[in-house]
Image (cartoon, rainbow, N blue to C red):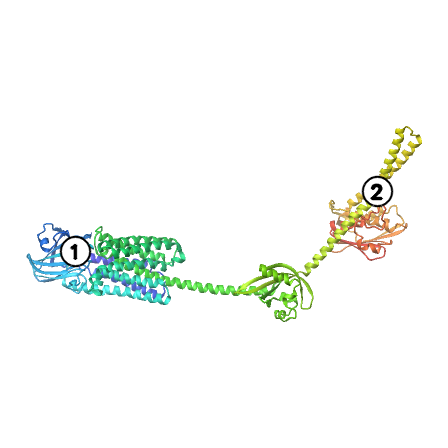
């Protein structure tokens, strides 16, 4: 046994060393949490030390022979029946016999192996037996009877200890017979030993010291967490305190401390204490993890699983109140073995879901699961009964409570971190809000549109600088102090108000505002109704569109001019073509009449040579007139086609421009020697230009001068000024003719505008053609100069 004690102490040392190196020892807990964790480690040491201390070694001055007898409860089971029974069995240890309702007799023959007298103690470890009767015999002579038992009002303790024990004075070289009758409906754990009186006293001393320390530390832990729970208003700490307290009572009931110290005179209560405390302990076991792990936040759907556990707990409580004691005890063991793996599986699932502290919770439950399983198996006589299996549930449960307390300490650390991060997030949010406020204020101040907010009464509460600029206010207060109410400054104020009241907003509504200086401005208004802390306010955006309106008016005027030009173009085409077409129609009608007349004479047979010659002569004149009109129409169409340059694809060439211009003018004025031409061009360098376009422009201008400028005279002068500035050609063309009529100056570049209307070659498309070429192809400018005669200026990029 001494070797067993040393092995147990060595195992505990190894366990403590592993626990020290584990991840739980390295948790970053607050200082007070570390202190309490140290106390919890002392609790574990006390627990294991207690198990060793209450299991002393055998003395060497005596031998013990053990015999075991089982009797049915229905038959005779008194001391006489036991003495006369032939069914005694020699055993090494009385062992564990599960939940057996039979009556067991233990026979110990204690022989002295020394010559001196010894003071011994025969002890049966507390095991919730209903009755334990000790009978002492010497040489078949009855000496004394000690009636004891858990269900007796006076359990009959001889020693000041919770275990059932009797004194035994053993003289040298003699022997004593001790018969122990054990009756009960609990598990038959027949742990009986013979020890010396001194060992008994030491066992009592160490049992009180160590278990007192265990209970004290556990109750201090419960009280400490209860106080924290009340002050922190956290249910997890309160539930843990009750769980530890009821676990403490549960353990005290199992090992007999409760019966001996707390309810010594209440045997009936002791009969149901283990079930009652077990029900309460299981209740808090189920309820505690919900608040410890904050499952409603991380995995709210697991609540249905806890509903199932609550149903199991309810059935457990009902069984304790209604079923017989032995059956309810079996139900209690079954519930314990059912809940332990279920809660362990829950912990593993929560670890998978990465719920905080789930790892510590699962680790704690693994200890209790192992301990409860060992107790259940030992109670059912499946595994051997020893110090660990006997106290497995208590050891596992105490380690579980210690680890759960560590989890609570870790929870404090996590809560502090969460609070720190929450405060940091709040500070960051406040900083971000301030930053966003500054940005909004800058946007409000620098917004290119007017922003105004109005109360539900229509009073201006704020107005950005752009809005003040639009209305010519010095500040937003002036809008309320003005003689004209703010909502009256909109030409469509009534429509804006009605639309906002009905729809809650009006968007991009065009209106005219009246400024503080009574000026009119075109604006668009967007007004939105909002609710600010239960009060209705209006937020408006006003955009000045005066420039856009001006542009629209210009575009409208240009569109009108385009339509007018198009009408003029259509009218000009119709007018120019209408005359030759009318001549053709008249000629065709005349020719048809002459043909009908000669045909009538031919049918009558009175056609003459003179009539035939007259027909031929008139038809020839008619066809000649039609041919001339068709040629006039063809010429007009060709000229009209030349007006469009979309089909023109000019190519640039590097040429001597001065020489090229002189060649064109010489060609155009070859048969007009009386018309002089003067070129003013200083540079004679080569330029990269469009020669074909120069040809068209110069020939059209010279033709225009010959047709219109020198119509009634044979003499005239044409001058051309040409220079280059910043890669741009500037050309000014003049003739000394009568110039352009004042009435035609504004329409000179329109189609069919001419001062010589009616002439087939004077269709009025020449300057229109030059205008299109300069503006559309060369992307330049052309303008009529205010000068004597005809003068025009053309500019375009090289």
Reading the image, the residue beneath label 1 is 183
Q: In the rendering, at what x and y percent does residue 628 appear? A: 85, 40
Q: In the rendering, at what x and y percent does residue 353 appear? A: 39, 54
Q: Secondary structure at mark 1?
A: strand
Asked where in the image residue 78 lies, by quadrant, the reply is: bottom left
Q: Is residue 326 left or right of residue 745?
A: left
Q: Is residue 352 left or right of residue 157?
A: right
Contact flag, marks 2 and 1 (Cβ < 8 Å): no
Q: In the rendering, at what x and y percent does residue 223 appear? A: 31, 66
Reading the image, the residue beneath label 2 is 582
Can residue 496 be seen at all in this image of the molecule?
A: yes
Say which of 78 and 651 sits in front. 78
Q: Is residue 420 left or right of residue 243?
A: right
Q: Earlier in the sequence, mark 2 or mark 1?
A: 1
Q: Secondary structure at mark 2?
A: helix
Residues packed near mark 2 inside 10 Å, few (<14), some (14 to 19) or many (20 plus): few
Asked where in the image residue 475 lies, by quadrant, the reply is: bottom right
Quadrant of the image containing the N terminus: bottom left
Residues packed near mark 1 inside 10 Å, few (<14), some (14 to 19) or many (20 plus): many
Say which of 34 and 412 sits in front. 412
Tell me the distance, in whole angstroms, between the alpha carbons under discs 2 and 1.
145 Å
Q: Is residue 700 left or right of residue 422?
A: right
What residue occupies the far right of the structure in this picture? Answer: 610
Q: In the rendering, at what x and y percent does residue 149 appear? A: 17, 60
What residue occupies the far top of the structure in this picture? Answer: 605
What residue occupies the far bottom of the structure in this picture? Answer: 481
- Which label is found at residue 47? none
Say which of 179 and 273 sits in front. 273
Can residue 14 be seen at all in this image of the molecule?
A: no
Q: How many circles with numbers are drawn on the protein? A: 2
């Amino acid at each position: 046994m001494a070797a067993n004690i040393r092995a147990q102490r060595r195992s505990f040392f190894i366990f403590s060393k592993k626990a020290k190196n584990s991840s739980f020892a390295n948790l970053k807990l607050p200082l007070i949490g570390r202190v309490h964790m140290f106390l919890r480690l002392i609790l574990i040491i006390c627990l294991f030390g207690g198990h060793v201390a209450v299991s002393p070694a055998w003395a060497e001055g005596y031998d013990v022979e053990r015999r075991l007898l089982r009797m049915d409860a229905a038959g005779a089971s008194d001391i006489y029946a036991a003495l006369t029974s032939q069914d005694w069995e020699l055993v090494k240890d009385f062992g564990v016999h599960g939940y057996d309702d039979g009556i067991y007799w233990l026979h110990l023959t204690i022989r002295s192996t020394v010559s001196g007298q010894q003071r011994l103690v025969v002890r049966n470890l507390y095991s919730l037996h209903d009755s334990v009767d000790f009978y002492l015999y010497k040489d078949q002579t009855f000496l004394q009877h000690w009636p004891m038992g858990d269900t007796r009002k006076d359990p009959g303790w001889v020693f000041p200890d919770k275990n059932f024990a009797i004194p035994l004075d053993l003289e040298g070289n003699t022997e004593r017979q001790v018969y122990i009758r054990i009756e009960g409906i609990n598990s038959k754990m027949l742990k009986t030993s013979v020890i010396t009186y001194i060992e008994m006293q030491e066992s009592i001393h160490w049992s009180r010291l160590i278990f007192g320390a265990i209970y004290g530390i556990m109750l201090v832990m419960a009280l400490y967490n209860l106080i924290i729970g009340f002050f922190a208003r956290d249910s997890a700490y309160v539930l843990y305190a009750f769980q530890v307290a009821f676990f403490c009572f549960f353990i005290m009931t199992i090992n007999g401390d409760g019966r001996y110290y707390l309810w010594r005179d209440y045997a009936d209560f002791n009969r149901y204490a283990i079930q009652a405390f077990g029900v309460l302990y299981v209740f808090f076991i189920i309820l505690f993890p919900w608040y410890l792990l904050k499952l409603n936040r991380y995995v709210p759907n697991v609540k249905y699983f806890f509903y199932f556990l609550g149903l199991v707990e309810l059935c457990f409580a009902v069984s304790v109140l209604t079923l017989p004691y032995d059956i309810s005890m079996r139900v209690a063991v079954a519930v314990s073995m059912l809940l332990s793996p279920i809660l362990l599986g829950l912990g593993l699932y929560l670890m998978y879901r990465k719920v905080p502290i789930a790892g510590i919770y699962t680790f704690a439950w693994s200890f209790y699961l192992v301990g409860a399983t060992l107790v259940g198996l030992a109670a059912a006589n499946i595994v051997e009964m020893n110090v660990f299996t006997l106290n497995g549930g208590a050891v596992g449960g105490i380690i579980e409570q210690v680890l759960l307390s560590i989890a609570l300490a870790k929870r404090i650390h996590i809560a502090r971190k969460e609070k720190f991060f929450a405060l940091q997030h709040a500070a960051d949010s406040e900083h971000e809000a301030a930053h966003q406020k500054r940005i909004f204020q800058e946007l409000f101040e620098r917004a290119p549109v007017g922003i105004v907010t109005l109360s539900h009464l229509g009073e201006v509460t704020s107005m950005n600088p752009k809005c003040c600029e639009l209305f010519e206010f010095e500040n937003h207060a002036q809008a309320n102090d003005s003689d004209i109410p703010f909502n009256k400054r909109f030409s469509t104020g009534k429509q804006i108000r009605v639309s906002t009241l009905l729809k809650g907003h009006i968007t991009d509504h065009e209106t005219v505002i009246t400024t503080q200086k009574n000026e009119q401005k075109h604006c668009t208004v967007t007004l939105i109704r909002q609710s600010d802390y239960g009060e209705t306010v209006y937020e408006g955006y006003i955009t000045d569109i005066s420039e856009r309106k001006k542009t629209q008016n210009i575009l409208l005027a240009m569109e009108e001019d385009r339509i007018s030009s198009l009408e003029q173009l259509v009218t000009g085409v119709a007018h120019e073509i209408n005359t030759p077409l009318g001549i053709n129609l008249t000629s065709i009608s005349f020719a048809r009449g002459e043909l009908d007349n000669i045909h009538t004479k031919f049918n009558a047979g009175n056609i003459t040579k003179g009539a035939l010659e007259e027909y031929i002569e008139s038809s020839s004149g008619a066809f000649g007139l039609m041919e001339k009109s068709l040629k006039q129409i063809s010429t007009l169409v060709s000229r009209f086609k030349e007006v469009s340059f979309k089909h023109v694809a000019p190519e640039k060439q590097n040429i001597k421009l001065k020489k090229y211009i002189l060649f064109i003018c010489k060609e155009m004025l070859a048969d007009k020697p009386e018309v002089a031409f003067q070129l003013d061009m200083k540079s004679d360098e080569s330029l990269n230009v469009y020669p074909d376009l120069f040809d068209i422009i110069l020939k059209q201008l010279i033709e225009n001068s010959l047709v219109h400028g020198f119509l009634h005279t044979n003499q005239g002068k044409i001058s051309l000024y040409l220079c280059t500035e910043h890669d741009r050609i500037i050309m000014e063309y003049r003739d000394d003719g009568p110039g352009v009529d004042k009435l035609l100056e504004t329409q000179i570049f329109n189609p069919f505008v001419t001062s010589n209307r009616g002439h087939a070659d004077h269709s009025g498309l020449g300057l229109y053609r030059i205008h299109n070429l300069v503006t559309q192809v060369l992307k330049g400018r052309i303008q009529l100069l205010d000068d004597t005669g005809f003068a025009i200026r053309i500019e375009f990029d090289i």
